[in-house]
Amino acid sequence: MLAASNPFAGGYDNLHIERLLQITYEDDCPPCFRPVHDSQAHLPDDELQLFPCLFNDDFALISEGQSISEGLDDRCQSTGLVRQVIYAVMGEVLSERHHVGDLYSLEEAQAMVHRLNFETGHYSRAWEISTAHLPDEAMLCLEAWVSHSAPRQTGLLFELFTLPDCGGIGCKLIGTPWTDDNLQNIEGQPYSSLKQEQLDAGTPEALVEVLYLAALADVRLLIFDPDAAVLDGLAIFYE
């Protein structure tokens, strides 16, 4: 599932910082970015910036004032000049790698990660969307499901509750994200098996599809409210 095709995709997962060297080399070539080799990772920024280097597709080595182990320089076929030390903030959306931004000090990059990566690790895990995203028969099924005097436990990794004041229905999603790897760990089965169980239990297919997209994006609370706004990119069954 591509991040761009899931309207619930929001915050970044696995935010981390990568120190990269911006290197210029031949006059007609744009700058390239490489991590410093592990053997020189201890060097502070001021011993990297504006120093000549050797580099290949995987790493760079400062070639002036630094000892390079025998044979390591043979792996680097290009020479250049380190123009800037970059602290790249990287993250993932639905397991896809994304470049969030570049900062010019470790402290600035750490501050960005702190702002983006809340205590929960997500921007928000609760969504309120219009009931227009479910067909009438699906809403009727939900209303029947929650009409029992006692709360109904579905055993299908989601639980339902009512919001009488607004005529809405909420879903608590369990065991998110609903990726094959995560579900194998907690349920011992891939998502396809969970989906079939949900369908066999009479869960409307339209609801199954919406819950899957939400759970894949690690949403924990999903509320269907007739007065809520529609979510761009999600199917609409009526206005």
Image (spheres, rainbow, N blue to C red):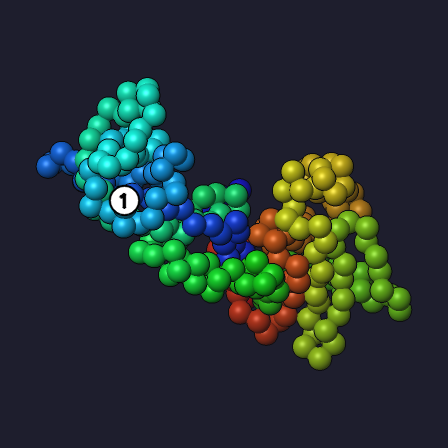
Residue drawn at x 84%, y 57% as measured from the top left: 153
Depth check, front residue: 43 or 5: 43
Of all residues shown, which one is farthest toward the left?
27
Amino acid type for the residue under numbered disc 1: Leu
Percent x, y of residue 101: 36, 54
Residue drawn at x 75%, y 51% as measured from the top left: 157
Is residue 109 found left or right of 177 in the rendered image?
A: left
Residue drawn at x 31%, y 49% as measured from the top left: 45
Depth check, front residue: 156 or 149: 156
Residue drawn at x 49%, y 52% as measured from the top left: 15
Percent x, y of residue 128: 60, 67
Which residue lies under the disc numbered 1? 48
Is residue 153 found left or right of 21 in the rendered image?
A: right
Image height check: is 178 above or below 137?
above
Q: Secondary structure at mark 1?
A: loop
Evaluate whether residue 19 shows in this view: yes
Percent x, y of residue 127: 59, 64
In the figure, residue 59 lies in which quadrant?
Answer: top left
Of all residues shown, which one is farthest toward the right?
149
Evaluate whether residue 131 shows in this view: no
Image height check: is 13 above or below 223?
above
Total labels drawn: 1
Image height check: is 199 above or below 121?
above
Mark 1 Cα shell of 10 Å, populated few (<14), some (14-19), many (≥20)? many
Is residue 33 found left or right of 159 in the rendered image?
A: left
Percent x, y of residue 160: 76, 62
Depth check, front residue: 34 or 140: 34
In the figure, residue 172 lies in which quadrant?
Answer: bottom right
* The C terminus lies in quadrant: bottom right
